[in-house]
Structures are given as C-alpha cells and as structure tokens.
Amino acid sequence: MKITKLLFAIAFFVVLVASAQDKTFTLEEIWGGVFSTEGLESLHSMKNGTEYSVIEQDAVSGAINIEVYNYESGEKTKTLVTSSSLGDLSTFQGYSFSKDENRILLSSQLEQIYRHSSRGIYHVYDVPSKGIFKVSDKKIQEPLLSPDGNKIAYVLDNNIYMLNFATGQEVQLTDDGKKNEIINGITDWVYEEEFAFVRAFDWSADSKKIAFLRFDEREVPEFSMDVYSKDLYPKQEVFKYPKAGEKNAKVSLYVADITAMTLDEVKLGDYKDFYIPRIKWTANPDVLSVQVMNRHQNNLDLIFVDAKTKTPKVVLNEKDTAYVDITDNLTFLEDNSFIWTSEKDGFNHIYHYTTTGELINQVTKGAWEVTNYYGYDKKNKKIYYQSVENGSINRDVYSIALDGKDKKRLSEKEGTNDADFSADFSFYINYFSNTTTPYEYTLNNGKTGAIVREIKNNKGLLEKLGKYDVRPKEFSTIEINGEKLNTWMIKPKDFDPTKKYPLFMFQYSGPGSQMVKNSWHRANDYWYMMLAKQGYIVACVDGRGTGLKGAKFKKVTQNDLGNLEVQDQIAVAKHFGALEYIDDSRIGIWGWSYGGFMSSNCLFKAPDVFKMAIAVAPVTNWRFYDTVYTERYLMTPQENAKGYDDNSPINFVNGLKGKFLLIHGSADDNVHVQNTMQLVEALIQANKDFDWAIYPDKNHGIYGGNTRLHLYNKMTNFITNNL
C-alpha cells in the first residue's frame, strides 16, 4: 500500500465559468473536471540526443500523431507516425521504440486489469518502409521488442510467446499457463501491487535469450467479489490474493535460449518462502541479475547468474533491521560495474560497485534523501539525480561525478523539480511547480542547468484561477512528540486570529509517504479551498513513519503500524486546538486507504479530541491485507498478533462518541470491502450510530461517471452538518 494507493490515479479536467472575483470553487467544477495543467504526452528522447518525440492530436483532422521536435530550437522536425495513414488502426494510445528506433510498437484498445496491468491490441510500425502489422488478433500483455528490433515477446493467457519478424516464426515458450494456477512472464496480483511491476521477463543484450519468472499460485487462497453491473445476476470475480500470514505463490526463474530453442530453470540457492522482486540482464549478454528477498523483506541478495551454466553467485547483500526497499535504480555500466541505491547509512544514497560486488565508492552523502535516479552519462562520467537537499518538502535536480565530486544543483526555483534527460544527457526538460506556480516545462542545459528555452507554461490557468478564491498553503514545522513535523494549513480569506474556527485535518500517514510537499494543487486542494471559503481551517501534518527524512524517522513504526502515527495526529489536533483561533470542540479528520485506517483510529481512540471523522476505503484490520505490504511492516500475524490487534479500529469501536462516515467501493480488489463490512458489524454490535455508503462496482479509487461528484457531495454535507 504505497503512497499511490491514496493518490487518485485518474485524469481530471475542469469546466471554468466566467465569474466575479473570488468566486468559490464548486464540486461540480472540481469533479466535473479539475483545474488541470497541460503537459507533454508520452515524451521519448531520440537516440541522437538532439530530438524528442511526443504524442499529439491534430487539431483539424483529429489524427493521433507521433511528432518529433528539436530540443534546442523547439521546431517540429517531422511527423513520425500518423493514425490517418495506418489503415485499420484508426488510433493508438501509446508507443515505444526498438533500440535502433527503426520499429515502433503501438498500443490500442487497452483494457485495464489491475492498478498497473492491462491488455490490448498491438501493432509494429516499421519506420523505413512505413509498413505496419498486428502482433496478434487477441489482446496481449506486456509486449517487448528485442534489443535488435527483430523480435518481440509477449504474454497471452499466462503464457510467453516470441515472434521473429525476419522469419515470421511464432514460438510459444510456455504451455502450462492457466488462470488462478500458473502465470508465466507477468506478475501475480500482489507482486504487481506491492513491487510495482507487471512484465516479469527481459531480453538479453544480444537478443538471444529471454529470462522470465513463473508463478505457481495454486496454493494461494482465493478472494472473490460480486460485480453487480446491470445484469439479472451478478458476476463473481475470483482471483488469488495472499493475505497476511497466508501462502504466497511459488516463484521460479527460467532462461529461454531462442537460438538453441532450450528452456532451463535456474536454481538460485537454498531459499525458502522468498520473493524475486526484480530481474534484469546486465551489459554482458551472458549475465543475468536477480534480486532475491526473504519473506520478512529485511534481507536482499543481488545475484548474478551465468546464463551458460545457470550458476548463481551472490554479489551484494543488503540487510536491515526493518526492511529493504525495492527500486528500479540498478544500472549497469559498460564494464558491468553497477550503480545501486541504499539506505544503509541512514539515508537513501547512490553507490558504485564493481562487477563482483566490491564497493568502489559512495557517490552521494548527507542527511538528506535521493528521491530519483535519472541515469549515468558515460561520456562525462556524471550521474544525474533528484533529492531533497534543499528541504524535505522540495525537490531539486543535481549532477555529480561518478567519484562523488563536482556536485552541482541544476534546478534553481524552489519547489518541485523533476527532469527528463535527452539520450546523451546534453539537455533535459525540467518539470517545475510549487504551491503557487502551476507546471512549467523548460528545456535546460544538462551541464549547467541554464534554461535554453521555455516549452510550455500554464499561465492561462493562473489567469482563470484569478477569478476564484484561491487560498495559499502555509507551510511550517511543528514540534510533536520530540520531532519537527512538516505541515501545511489553508485558512479562510477573511481569517481573523481573534475568532474561533473549526479545524478539518487530512492525512495519509503510511510508511514512506509524503502529503506535505511544495508542489502545485491536486484536486483535493480545491476542495479544501472550498471548505475554507465556508469558514473551515484545513491542515495536514506528516507524522512519524512518513518519508524523506531518513530511515530512522520512516521505520520507527516498524511492527506497530497505527500506534505512533495515531499518537502524532492526536497530539497535532491538541496542538492546533490550543491555538487561539481554533475551536478545540470542532476538530475533524479524514483519510483514504491508510488514511482511513488512521482517521478511524483517531476518532475511536481520542473521542474527546475529534468531533467527527471520515474514512474512505480503509484498512480496518491488517489481517485482511496482502502479504507483501503488511508483513514488510508487521511480520506475520502468527509472529506479531499484538501488532495487528492493538491498532485495529475494529477492536476500538466502543470509543466512538462523535460522528463517523464510512465509505467503500464494493469492487475494491486492493483494500477489500470486507474491511468495511467487518467494521460495520463491530459498530452495530457495539450499538454505535454512524453513517456509511457503498459504491457499487467501484474499485479503490471510487470514480467513474458522477461517482466522485456524489462522493464529495456526501463528504461535504457530512462536514457541514457535523463540524
């Protein structure tokens, strides 16, 4: 349950109406779309380093095009693909290039499965000949072009296939795939959700071998949920979902030799009940890297496998008293030495190792976190990264030499800076925003950070927002339980410090998350401004257990989720309640997912502090949640029953005095509606009055049609009536 479980993974668009100065935001405007910023769609840096491509829609014909632009001049150099000339393929949604950029994989008719997974129809477009062909008449998953561009591998019905363009030969590499039993080449539900990847196969650098994972989930317990739709009878969705303490899928590693047409299992060693959260071929086409982690996730081995002999060798080991984070930062240099990130000195930093796993040097150091690794410029021996060196609520782009010298801050403006580098690192597109500035896209020099030209700004949005009562976020830190915690607060425009205002608190609080950051508004921020217009003060505080302030701060909640975090939010409410302008008898709190777990606990455990709470899609007992996420922080229920039960809202319903609104989607495959049903039953048996709503066939995001508008109307009315 990473931070993304709370963040709403859908695009919002706004309907703005001319109005008088200081018009208040309405829910119809916010959820009939949102005051959105314009961006760059599917940007790809071309291998020549001087150009980039993006998807654009022709304003006249409506055709979907892949347009190529010159970085420095900003001028369009060519239209690489246009849907108007693709015959039966009238449109496409995404694209990816072969390594030589002579072939382009186009995706269409995409159908979402879970959070990251989808299936769709794919075509391969040949750039030199302008020819196009369909990979399969059926919807396939995770197609990947080989490095030489002459082959493609993909998954269909849990089996891996390989198609050779030159010979026209299609080879089915596996034949035992079956729903809810065996999966080849893609991940099961829990790997997809918690290790954040779907494609579980990779091509070797010479395009001769495919390594892949096989999941045997026959012993994994099944979860089922009814999908009501509009049919006479509901349909039942059944899938494998390993809950805390239950059996996981058995994962194994295979290497297929395309030339020799052989398929071999790789025995990695004497591991029991383990995960393989990443596989990746090194720069050497005969060496495969594999990351193996124990079930507690506090011991990680980086293994190099000799693809010829299938012999594994541990080259690096990471241990932690709590857990080891999985990332995609592993990068192999030409000599097969590698870049690695680790929290082993207490903060997330970049390290350089030899091909045998010996430490060459720690590249970055300091009491701050590296938050993104962009890549390595082999010509200038520079590493590019993002960090919070300039304050934990800000992000900046940096370069540093491979030996750890010559560090340079490339971004200048204070706020959130992100980067997309050209293939040769000579340029990068900087994505900047802060709480008062919507996204600005500029082309910057990769060596100096100097702005070359402006690509896109969102000043038009600022002009439109000038008609509305846009309330600023006031950032500060407050000392709570011995820690300085980041906070923001939104106050009414006519704020009078001699008056008393009700306080509405928002938080998420999950391990490693961050809600207090200096970036442009999300949809909820406009809702908070609307509430401020109605006379509420809205505040958010990142307590202990949240991220980007070092491993100790983040991992202090280990084996005791919901204890220190709840203590902090209660203490925060008391701190704010003691301010002259806060009415301490009118404090409410809300949250989604982990935040709903928290808001429920706060209301039940501190009934004299909080007058009301809203919990959306909450975990109510960690015994109901998946193995990978839950056991990472709590171990298993068999090992740590106290950690599960002492902080479960279900066990504290007798403390409810205030007003409580509980909301869930009936088709939530992530945090199952079972959580809410169990809490509802506990509240009923405790004879507690509360309000609740179930949104039929809606998942963890609870959206679609007028759903969000209805949800936020309900929450707004509940706040208005009870706070």
Image: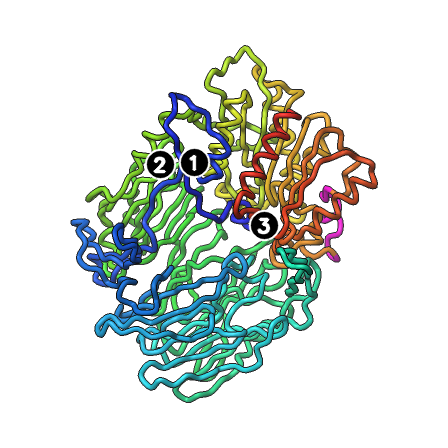
Q: Marks 3 and 2: which is nearer the front? A: 3
Q: Residues within 10 Å of mark 1 (few under 14, many from 20)?
A: many
Please report contact status of discs 1 and 2: CB closer than 8 Å, yes or no: yes
Q: CA distance from mark 3 to mark 2?
A: 28 Å
Q: Marks 1 and 3: which is nearer the front? A: 3
User: Secondary structure beneath disc 1?
Assistant: loop
Q: Quadrant of residue 425?
A: bottom left
Residue 438 is tagged as 2
* Magenta stretch bounds: 638-649
Foreground: 568 or 47? 47
Could you tell me the amino acid type at mark 3? His
Query: What residue is rendered at 62% in x and 42% in y?
Result: 616
Q: Quadrant of residue 178?
A: bottom right
User: Secondary structure beneath disc 2?
Assistant: strand
Name the residue carrying label 1.
521
Looking at the image, tell me whether mark 1 or mark 3 is earlier in sequence order.
1
Q: Establish if 418 lies above or below 464.
A: below
Query: What residue is rendered at 29% in x and 44% in y?
Result: 408
Residue 645 is a magenta residue: yes
Q: Is residue 551 left or right of residue 330?
A: right
Query: What residue is rendered at 27% in x and 62% in y?
Result: 82
Could you tell me the amino acid type at mark 1? His
Q: Position of residue 91 (x, y in %)?
A: 35, 61
Name the residue carrying label 3.
700
Foreground: 617 or 233? 233
Q: Position of residue 198 (x, y in %)?
A: 50, 64
Q: Residues within 10 Å of mark 2 (few under 14, many from 20)?
A: many
User: Secondary structure beneath disc 3?
Assistant: loop
Residue 244 is a magenta residue: no
Q: Residues within 10 Å of mark 3 (few under 14, many from 20)?
A: many
Q: CA distance from mark 1 to mark 2?
A: 8 Å
Could you tell me the amino acid type at mark 2? Pro
